[in-house]
Image: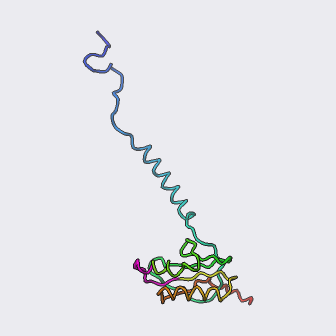
Amino acid sequence: MVGSVAGGRHKPGRTKLMAEINVTPMVDVMLVLLIVFMVAAPLLVSGVAVDLPETAAAPIQEAGEPLTVTIAEDGTIYVQDTPIEYENLVSHLEAIATAGYDQRILIRGDKDRAYGDVVRIMGRINAAGFRQIGLVTNPELLDGAN
């Protein structure tokens, strides 16, 4: 019996099947996915679009990400990215305070909102027990053409 398989042996000249996983294609796919996520991640940063007023004030140096309360142009109030009713703002902030948050709260008020609206929200934040409140602005453009 020349050339036949006897006792589980292969024919001469045929390659033996490999029981190993070739990791090169898997690494290639993982690198492509990594690049896709690295490019897409900055685009996923969400926030409430607000046209902030401009000032020449120096930026506040904060450790960590501060809690932001945003007052949009249409009057909608957001805590971070979550819309909150005006009546529920104090209870929502008190719940955050009881969870252990005791840092500065930043207010982002649209420049087209009335000053009184921003001050009312500031008063509600103060009523929730927060004493360190900051106002977020854009840097003022000093081009000499005032």
Number of callouts in the render? 0
Give the answer, above or below, for where 35 lies relative to 103.
above
Q: Which residues are magenta?
A: 96-105
From the top left corner, tell me how far across and down residue 79 is, in percent: 54, 76
Q: Looking at the image, which residue is at 53% across and 55% down?
A: 36
Give the answer, above or below, for where 125 lies relative to 18.
below
The figure's colour scheme reads rainbow
| Closer to us: 37 or 9 | 37
Residue 94 shown in magenta? no
The chief SS type of the magenta part is loop
| Closer to us: 102 or 26 | 102
Q: Looking at the image, which residue is at 34% across and 32% down?
A: 18
Q: Looking at the image, which residue is at 28% across and 9% down?
A: 1
From the top left corner, tell me how far across and down residue 28 is, in percent: 46, 47
Q: Residue furthest right?
A: 145
From the top left corner, tell me how far across and down residue 9 is, in percent: 28, 21
Give the answer, above or below, for where 14 lies relative to 118.
above
From the top left corner, tell me how far across and down residue 51 is, in percent: 66, 78
The quarter in which the C terminus is drawn is: bottom right
Q: Looking at the image, which residue is at 66% across and 84% down?
A: 53
Residue 98 shown in magenta? yes
